[in-house]
Amino acid sequence: MSIPGPAAGFEAASAEVIDLKALQADSDIAAPMAELDRDLVGLAPVKQRIREIAAFLLVARARERVGLAAGPPTLHMAFTGNPGTGKTTVALRMAGILHRLGYVRKGHLVSVTRDDLVGQYIGHTAPKTKDVLKRAMGGVLFIDEAYYLHRPENEKDYGQEAIEILLQVMENQREDLVVILAGYRDRMASFFVSNPGFRSRIAHHIDFPDYDASELLAIAELLAAQSDYRLSPAAREAMIEYITRRQQQPSFSNGRSIRNALDRARLRQAMRLYAGNAVATREALQTIEAEDIRASRVFAT
Amino acid sequence: MRVTQGTFSFLPDLTDRQISDQIEYCLRQGWAVGVEFTDDIHPRNTYWEMWGLPMFDLRDAAGVMAEVRACRETHPDVYVRLTAFDSTRGWETVRLSFLVQRPAEEPGFRLERTEAEGRSIRYGLSAYAIDRPVGERYKSKQANAAQGDSP
Amino acid sequence: MVFPEMEDIMGQMGNFTKIQDAKQRYKSGVIPYATMGYWEPDYQVKDTDILAMFRVTPQPGVDPIEAAAAVAGESSTATWTVVWTDRLTACEIYRAKAYRVDPVPNTGPGTATEAQYFAYIAYDIDLFEPGSIANLTASIIGNVFGFKAVKALRLEDMHIPIAYLKTFQGPATGIVVERERLDKFGRPLLGATTKPKLGLSGRNYGRVVYEALKGGLDFVKDDENINSQPFMHWRDRYLYCMEAVNRAQAATGEVKGHYLNVTAGTMEEMYERAEFAKQLGSVIIMIDLVIGYTAIQSMAKWARKNDMILHLHRAGNSTYSRQKSHGMNFRVICKWMRMAGVDHIHAGTVVGKLEGDPLMVKGFYDTLRSTDTKVNLQNGLFFPQEWASLNKVMPVASGGIHAGQMHQLLDYLGEDVVLQFGGGTIGHPMGIQAGATANRVALEAMVLARNEGRDIRNEGPEILRDAAKWCQPLRAALDTWGEITFNYTSTDTSDFTPTAVAV
Ligand SMILES: Nc1ncnc2c1ncn2[C@@H]1O[C@H](COP(=O)(O)OP(=O)(O)O)[C@@H](O)[C@H]1O
Ligand SMILES: [Mg+2]
């Protein structure tokens, strides 16, 4: 099956010179890369790795055009890092970028966990896994907490069946879909040790570091702005304090904790305006105040 | 003879590339595509065996093609067709159906005539292959190739 | 829609008010219809009202509003003079109401056509017998069409409320079930009318049927005037045709059919013929529009009861549907026939030899096939129409079409249509089978290409030429007819765009 490739930059089919800039412009890759930079706070090493991969794929296309050794590159990836560090968000962007570059035909993301792949009884797993794979064809299959597929303590675990089907498709249908495995760093490491088949089929390992406090604040302001809210100066101070406290808690999960905190602050803001019983100005409607944040349980101790 | 059931039977057998393009068309329309096979090619045999359920929510033809290949591999000597189902109100039926495999040899149909009252005739149609048991109705491709090789 | 000239003309229209005082209103004598209550510009249309829109050409000196009111009156309760017996009824309800009159664009002073008006009229549902096209039409296209105050009158469109639609059976089989029975999906069906129309013996006639079906057509058809004549009695024809159908099924493994025309002088004879067709295993029978609305409804009931597809030939319609100023638009026939319950109806080809402006034909096809048509003035659809789950009718395109036009046919008409290539099959230089094969190959190649996303409107000829490289019958067909087109201006055209000339 051929893949619709970007057009004009490749025209000079057997030429000795290929205009990489034109190629880049034609594949429309600049836009999603810029969005990645703009919409995602921090993640410098991740962004750098994605730039590298994009460059590599672009050059692979150019090599193919001038007849240098080329084959469908392996694109399966592992995203490791703690919860809320942006793995899912980046995977979604990745699907778009791979689509622009012509490495997946449709560019959608199908996100699953063990329960979507593994069945409850004999004969249940293969159809389930195959069904997910078929839905992901043409796009990216994102398997969150992939290590749960492997249950070393249980010999008769159906997870093994799913793993075998996955491995086969990852090997034989590389042009049909890209698989991204995601999860905690250490658990993924031991998963790869006990499943060398996966290790060898993964071309890119990308590590997602935890965010520091200033990045978390930036995420808070970005998420707020994306839905037409803003933090008052006092609320901003409250958020900084919230972040420091929240980071200490065991259940802290980076960006997700921030998103949840904001969602709750919006609820409190609504209650405050409603109870205030006055006419709300446009200004008031979009402002989160310090009290909306400080009412959190995080400040209780 | 050549059985001409299905939408594209007057064209040369479709290549996998062409089949895949038609699947893409079906997916763009929002239809679910199923693989079906039979060795009973009577024109009123509606219920061919299902090779799995119709596939819902696919975005790309590759998933269907994988099933087509698997079905052909398991049943190399029978008729295989793709059937696209539309769930839109006012349709709720098959919208496209075409063969993606046919046996190497198609012996055709016998037309049985029974004279009835006046000059009326009752007609009965049956495939010559139907007389053999299920699974042995059409010559295997290998056997056929071997035959072709012999002088 | 607002037209620049509208204001002026509206200024010329009379200003009538309904006479409210009963004594005045029912005084013996002649008063304007518009003041009798047949003109109600403020009338609120009810969900259950049946609506009709007429193109009215008033006699010189007759006010357009009065003309519209007269049409409303004459198609409902009125007579030429006041009658006191009106007062024994709830006549306010039974009176049809003209509620809107618009000047027709490009008519009247300064144009080549004398002034015409679109008159919108509402009828209460209780004016009509449930489930009877005959009763509906006796009012709507009854005496009113001979009425002197209008010089010409044309029924342009109707809106049938769901409440009234539900009293009709609708198509006996419908597009969905027809396709399921025939096991043919995703492409237009192919047919041909046996030629010559008249004179073949049953035996020779069946030969044409067999050749065409074996060559690749799905259906062959009797012509509208093939009933039971001295050269071929109906039973003979049925017997030979069914032999041909069955032979062709055996030769191809496909379901095949021949529309056996059951049109006859009496209902009893029609039933007898239909029964025989069923006994012989035919999937389809045929009737002509000239048998009348009641006979059509009877045959539709019979077809539903007997698992039969019902094909209707629109013989006769052009006597009243073709001229733009008088008669009725074919789209109304389409509506009535969908209600009456036929499965197929000839509805124009756009590119063939018979009348058919592309926009108008689009309106007919939408009326037959959609579940919910929207107002579309360009296509002549003046009212929205919800079809209340009545089956869809398969339009039939027939008359002077050939394989070289396949891309245009598919593009204009879509895939739910029967394409009938009579001459284009039987007149093929290599014989009837080759003619049928050429059509089928051209069709399948075009559907394949369309589905692949190719621009068939522009690449069509190239797609056909490519297929002709490996299909000799198609090559011969293109060589013979490739250049034939019929470029006459249609007479029944849209009032809302410049006339499009058939391709
Ligand atoms: N770098 C970032 N910039 C902006 N928002 C982020 C960033 N990282 C995470 N988020 C937000 O945090 C939430 C959780 O991120 P997610 O991608 O689901 O993390 P993971 O998949 O690693 O658990 C998302 O709602 C996302 O919007
Ligand atoms: Mg996640």
Image: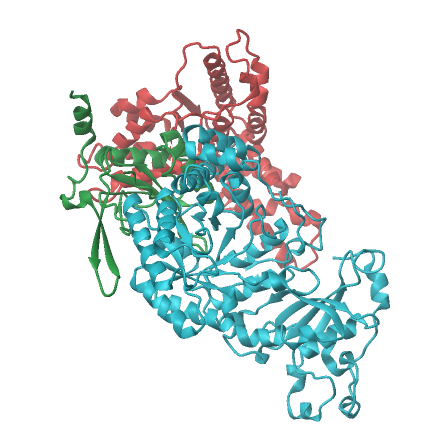
Chain colours: A red, B green, C cyan
Quarter the N terminus of chain B occupies: top left
- Residue A5, given in percent of the width and then of the height, sits at 49, 23
- Taking the image as shown, residue A59 lies to the left or right of residue C255, namely right
- Residue A197, given in percent of the width and then of the height, sits at 27, 23
Q: Residue at x 38, y 41 (%)?
A: C433
- Taking the image as shown, residue A79 lies to the left or right of residue C6, namely left
- The answer to which of C307 and A63 lies nearer the viewer is C307
Residue A105 visible to an observer of this rendering:
no
Which quadrant of the structure image shows residue A234?
top right
Q: Residue at x 45, y 69 (%)?
A: C169
- Taking the image as shown, residue A284 lies to the left or right of residue C260, namely right
- The answer to which of B9 and B91 lies nearer the viewer is B9
- The answer to which of C4 and C286 lies nearer the viewer is C286
Q: Residue at x 83, y 74 (%)?
A: C15
- Look at the picture and state if A102 lies above or below C313: above
Which quadrant of the structure image shows residue C116?
bottom right
- Look at the picture and state if A272 lies above or below C140: above
- Residue C216, given in percent of the width and then of the height, sits at 38, 43
* Tag count: 0
- Look at the picture and state if C25 lies above or below C205: below
Quarter the C terminus of chain B occupies: top left
Q: Residue at x 32, y 56 (%)?
A: C240
Residue B88 visible to an observer of this rendering:
yes
- The answer to which of C51 and C372 lies nearer the viewer is C51
Which quadrant of the structure image shows residue A196?
top left
- Residue A286, given in percent of the width and then of the height, sits at 65, 46
Q: Residue furthest top?
A: A16
